[in-house]
Image (spheres, grey):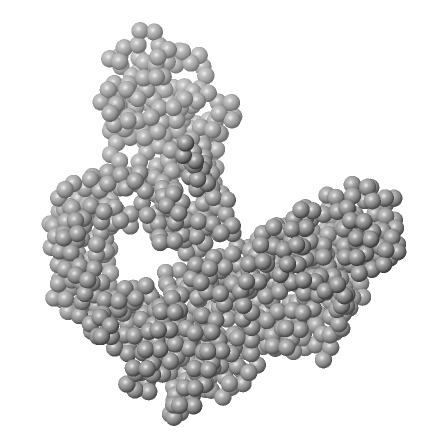
Amino acid sequence: MKQATSSEVFMHVIREWEWPFTGRKAEMALFGEALQDPGARAFSIHGPTGVGRTRMAEECRGVMERAGMRTSQIVGRSDLSMIPFGAAGHLLHRLAAFDGSLPAYTVAARLISELEGHTLHIVVDDVHLLDAPSAMLLRQLMDAGAVFLVLTVRSDAEVSDAVAALLRTDAVYRVDLKEFSHDAAENLLRGTLGGAMERRTMQELMDISHGNALFLRELVLGAIAEGRLTSDGEVWELNLGPKATPALIELVRARVEEGGLGGKRILDLLALCGPVPLTDAEAEGPSATIVTLEKARLVKTHLDGRRTVVELSHPLFGEVLQLDIAPEYRSEILLRQAQRTERFGMRRTADPLKVAQWRLEATGTADTDLLVRAASLAHASHEYSQVIALLSGIALADRTTLGRTLLGSALMEVGEFDEAETVLREAQERAESEDEALAALQVRTYSLFMDGQVDLALRVTREATAAMGSSRARELLVLNEATMLAVAGEPARANRLFDTLTDDVTQAAESGAWLRGRPMKAAALAVQGRTDAALRVVDDAYRIHLSLSDREGTPHQASELISAVLAYSDAGRFAEAADAGAQGVRELMDTDIWFLQLWLLFHMGRGEWLAGHPVTARRLYGEAAAQARRVNHGKVMRLALSGLAASAAVCGDLHAATAAVRESMTYPYVGYLSGEERLGEAWVNVVAGNHSEALRVLNEAVISARDTGHLTSEGMLLTDIARLGDARAVAGRLSEIARDSDGLLAPARAGLAAGLAESDSVALAECADAFEGLGADLLTAEAHIAAADAWQKAGRDREGTGATMRGRAALTRCEGARTPLVSLAAGAPTARLTPRERQIASLAVKGLSSKEIADRLMFSVRTIHNSLQAIYKKVGVTNRKQLAEHLGRYLTLAEGDQVRAEGELTAKHPVSRRFRPFPRYSR
């Protein structure tokens, strides 16, 4: 017997399982009003095919049944529409000597008598297909108050007079269902698949389905069945794009057939060539045919500038229509449309690109100059897959330096670094002028840098700087080096180089290269704490970006938004960081610029982590890692996986956190945001109860950040040390960082450390207010909770209670985050324990003997015995058994998870058995 695979089992489950009903809250609220209205007799649900009319009607029936109402169902069918009472026949079986020739009012009277004063609630699906007697019967029953109807109607269907009479009365509540919004569709899929959708995947599904529930369901099922929609455990990601399933193909084919055979030539043209001028469509068929197709909602027309354009009304129509076009006929259509466009002189900007694509698809080749011109247009629009397709149609011997540079750039942008290096090295070697060589060199070194070959990229740049004599060349190569150093762990050196270059784009050697360097300059400033200067650079460059966006060689303006997210986050302006990130996502959604997308997602995740939103941060870090994994971009992976691990750990998912740390360690250190690549490792140890190891990791991370000049990263890591109980060791250094940093986040961090070090309730309360003003929700909660603890220890219970309540209120915005300071809230029995006592208690509850605890923490057995006695007294127990019973439910992790985490981490980073106290930091 053939064994079912796990994917087949999963497919069966999600096909058979009723998908969650979501996104219709307002519509269901209106249904509730209709049920409560004594004058209401029906609730009609209108909408196009696949929008979810039947699904909502089922939900309505469930509501009525749960309320104890008597229900039944009628389904309209085209094959019964000419048979009297064909649809409602099953309701009439109880009537003695029922005769289908009886008038509807007679049948209604008999049925009302049978109901004996009770109201029957009937769901009528596809009421537009009812036979006339059934419709008239329902109207008679409705007028008599004997029934309450839930009706579904296809919005573009023609209805008979009898059905119209049923619908057009003041006693009917009406709702028109629309396609799902992006957010509603995403919530539906998250609820169905049990995980977040990667943003590009979600956008692709929305682009094809337009939010139609049926189309969306079939696309997802088809993609899972073919292994194109998969999850890495964090996010679901689509490879190769969504495709229609057989069921969806048949549904669309039936819809297309409604337009008749007369419109086939027009539909085929639109399927292959997309939106075309009305005059071109009329060349394939008369105007009357186009009107017929528009009435059938197969095509739509709209103005594009001064001309009328025709296009298919849904992208799925094009996909299905193309399946039925013979290859020879396909080529004929494409060439006819190319010739039409050429006859009019290809006056529109995009016309050369369209004509090149049509000719290439029809014949496999096109004029070389046309292909290069089209590739330049596609490159300027950041459509890099198109660039590769177009330039691949040129024979190797016919490729120019410009063509090679464009091709190498596009290959780099889609993550094909090895092939890009081959093409770009050849372009540089074959360049016939310094300008051509510089253009190829800049793209080549950037590609090497993005591939993680930083040393080689810098060496190639420096060799070229020595070889090229012009001042223009030297300026561009210095800019090239500064751009790389900014995000390779040397921000101070990068800024020294940037300071030798002009800040005026009109004085720059090349505007595109100047713009490419601005976000890197902003990043180098931001990580050194100069966030105000960084944001000025970003604002100025973004404005210039927009004014030059149509110029060849201009990078995408979203690169500035990445640095904006970084600078806003490190300044503590979290709402502005989120807004900049959301804007970047919108601007990048329809492009192939994968590296901007994944770096933007990473920085957005980092911003949410700093704001204390670990669930949102985990999703964003996961999306960044998924995209990077797909294009084999290891440069961001260690940072993204570290952030993901920290977020998962704080959410209590130690298994996922440990797996992320383990994977992160397989990627190289990159230098950017130095020290933060250890964040996940530290928080896994925190949540596993290994506080001394967490402090050791953070100690090393702080040194790395400080040695490389990443002031804001150092501040983040030092704050974590303070939160773990060693505030006195770091308070002085955090105060120094606050003096050297822009924004309000660094001073608030310094205040938190000072307040924790002195157990100063007033200072902690002031810090909490400062964090709350920034939107740093988890730090707000922790500061309030620490203040409450300090008040209570001082015997000021009233102030302590108030601070506790404020801390709990802030925690509701922290997405379930769990940290050592949070454990002080809610009167937990661990609240009175010191960090060291909590660690010893945790190990004791897990069953370790005093000797085992002493060996692990490098203390004497007597010290552990004394500590346990102090713990018993504070918690109010007398032995280990009582301690386990009392504290067990407060432990964050399962013992198995902790043991597994410790083993996996130790295998990668063996822990020294010698205790190394955390040093005091000062200048």
Q: Quadrant of residue 338?
A: bottom left
Q: Is residue 651 visible?
A: no
Q: Quadrant of residue 8?
A: top left
Foreground of the two, 333 or 910: 910
Foreground of the two, 741 or 652: 652
- The picture places residue 413, in percent across and down from the top left corner, at 38, 68
Q: Residue at x 26, y 31 (%)?
A: 159
- The picture places residue 825, in percent across and down from the top left corner, at 74, 51
Above or below 149: residue 566: below
Q: Residue at x 58, y 58 (%)?
A: 662
Foreground of the two, 341 or 169: 341
Q: Decide if residue 295 is on the left or right side of residue 425.
A: left
- The picture places residue 701, in percent across and down from the top left corner, at 65, 69
Foreground of the two, 550 or 837: 837
- The picture places residue 112, in percent across and down from the top left corner, at 39, 14
The tally of labels here is: 0
Above or below 456: residue 652: above
Q: Is residue 237 visible?
A: yes
Q: Quadrant of the N terminus?
A: top left
Q: Decide if residue 500 is on the left or right side of residue 86.
A: right
Q: Residue at x 82, y 53 (%)?
A: 851
Q: Decide if residue 907 is on the left or right side of residue 306.
A: right
User: Which residue lies most toward the top here?
Assistant: 97
Q: Quadrant of residue 59?
A: top left
Above or below 474: residue 6: above
Q: Quadrant of the C terminus?
A: bottom right
Q: Residue at x 48, y 22 (%)?
A: 69
